[in-house]
Image: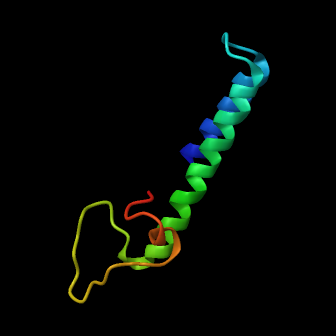
Amino acid sequence: MVFWFLVLVAVWVGYAGFGPLPDWTYYLGLSLSILGNAIWFWGHQTLGRHYSQALVIYQGHQLVERGPYRFVRHPM
């Protein structure tokens, strides 16, 4: 929820023309932000019930090797 609020603020600031940077930097930053959030969500969905804010090892826990974890150990 906070992410989408920040995206709306970025859109408003970008269209208002604040700051010395050229317009393409606004679109690049917004695109990378949305891509990063999508990768985080993909990783969260891949872990499912094993997702936790704290490092917790459960009985019978196995290394996840699917989804974004095929490429990196900690995509989030």
Extreme residue toward the front, this view: 71
Query: Which residue: 42% across, 63% down?
Result: 72
- Where residue 48 sits: x, y (%)? 45, 76
Query: Which residue: 38% across, 70% down?
Result: 51
Query: Which residue: 32% across, 60% down?
Result: 53
Q: Height in image: 10 above or below 1?
A: above
Q: Quadrant of residue 16?
A: top right
Q: Using residue 14 as the reference point, say whether residue 67 is left or right of it.
A: left
Query: Which residue: 70% across, 22% down?
Result: 13
Extreme residue toward the top, this view: 20
Q: Height in image: 11 above or below 57?
A: above
Q: Quadrant of the C terminus?
A: bottom left
- Where residue 36 sits: x, y (%)? 56, 50
- Where residue 39 sits: x, y (%)? 55, 59
Q: How many marks?
A: 0
Q: Using residue 16 as the reference point, say whether residue 63 is left or right of it.
A: left
Q: Quadrant of residue 57?
A: bottom left
- Where residue 7 sits: x, y (%)? 65, 38
Q: Using residue 43 as the reference point, say whether residue 56 is left or right of it.
A: left
Q: Height in image: 58 above or below 6?
A: below
How is the model colour-coded? rainbow
Q: Height in image: 59 above or below 40?
A: below
